[in-house]
Amino acid sequence: MRTDDLVAALAADAAPVDNARAERRFRDRLLWGPAIAIVLMLLLLGPRPDLAEAMRLPMFWLKAGLPASVAAACWLLLYRLGHPGARLGRSPAAALAPLALVSLAGALVLWNAAPAERESLLFGQTWRDCLVNVTILALPALALALLALRGLAPTRLALAGAAAGLFAGAAGAFAYAFHCPELEVPFLGAWYVAGMLMPAVVGALLGRRLLRW
Amino acid sequence: MPAWTMGSPVALAVATDRRHRMDAEERANAIEQRLRAQFVAALDGDAASYRAFLSALGAHLRAFLRRRMAQWPDDVEDLVQETLLAIHDHRHTYRREQPLTAWVHTIARYKLIDHLRARARHEALNDPLDEELELFARSDTEAAEARRDLQQMLQVLPERQRRALMLVKLAGASVAETARATGQSEAAVKVGVHRGIKALAARFRSGT
């Protein structure tokens, strides 16, 4: 095809473009991820029996607030990654800072703890469940976040995939926090962080293939 | 600037260079203004503006891509069309408060790197010179031979160095673009290019 013909064909296709519709679709696809993660948690795992009591503890809110802040920062990052030419600014750092902070705090707590207590502070009773469940709860959110990106135009595919995965991991960790019985900072700093980073790695690998356009 | 350099050839060259740069900047700004006005009208549904925008943009893309694809002149027009199509399909991701140049440039660069990557994969599997071409490309012999020599020489390099060298030195991609295309860090690309050139130079001197 000659380029002039292509230009004519595309120009004939001109119609008012509704940016707001695309933005709404992006928002909806992202919102469904955490919603599905919470429903899955309620159906498959159930909330912890003493949830009402636990919710009075500040530590519970740190546990839920950590993934919530990561998810919020990832939202902005995903939006920017999906719009060509938008500067990322500090949004990648904002998404990773909560993870770094809580891991650092966990390491400090371990450092100061009596050697005999360290193992139970770090591993708790349920570290394997935490990794597995956060990842499983994150999967639908990962698919939806990748779909949300496909509705935009990401040009840094691995990074965009990683951001989608981190967002999904945060959604999974947030939902899991309502089931999880652990309340120690080293546990959060190790297993919640690892549980959020695993979907990010998966997302980076998937992004290279699935986000091409 | 020290007084003794005033009017010297150096000062003159510096001043001329600066003037050229400013001219280019002003021109780019004027083009940005015009294209953006046309594009915004097109986003509101004006087909005539859209057509004018796309033809002008096609010309800019052609120049941009031709410079970066000197090795594959036959692919330039395909890539111009592919980029125009991508811009059309993703025009809902343009935000009106944003410079149009940044948006278009990011998309064009993405399409270019995607193409170069596919090309590199293809050439790794296929001999770039088939017999037919060699038979009929009489007037082109010298250029073709030079390219084949280069390809052969590049074969001696390790994969990572070769790809970095091809993208940066032959295709004209920037270090950052190459890093993204090959999944290496920018530092690794720089080191790869540097070592690749040194290795080639050493080979060339020893005549093997």
Image: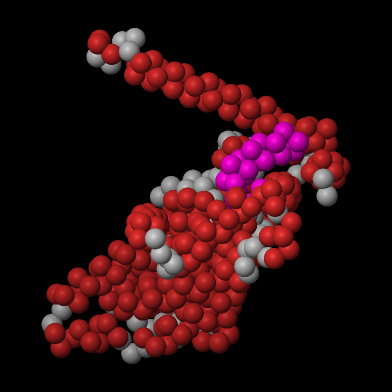
Q: Main secondary structure of the magenta part?
A: helix
Residue visible at 23% across and 87% down?
A119
List x then y, in percent, for residue A46.
51, 85
| Numbered range of the magenta stretch | B54-73
Task: Give the camera-side residue of A55 and B7.
Answer: B7
Q: Quadrant of residue A114?
A: bottom left
Assess whether residue B5 is covered by the magenta stretch: no
Q: Is residue B49 visible?
A: yes
Nearer to the camera, A53 or B63 = B63
Q: Quick one: B174 or A196, which is closer to the camera? A: B174
Q: Is residue B89 left or right of residue B189?
A: right
Residue B81 image point, x, y percent: 74, 48
Residue B155: image location, x then y, percent: 48, 66
* In this view, B178 is above or below A100: above
Instruction: Tell me where residue A33 appears, x and y as whole percent.
Output: 58, 69
Q: Residue at horizontal 30%, vertical 86%? A: A124
Q: Is residue A10 left or right of residue B125?
A: right
Q: Is A212 left or right of A137, judged from the image as shown?
A: right
Q: Quadrant of the C terminus of chain B?
A: bottom left
Q: Is A181 on the left or on the right of B180, as rendered?
A: left
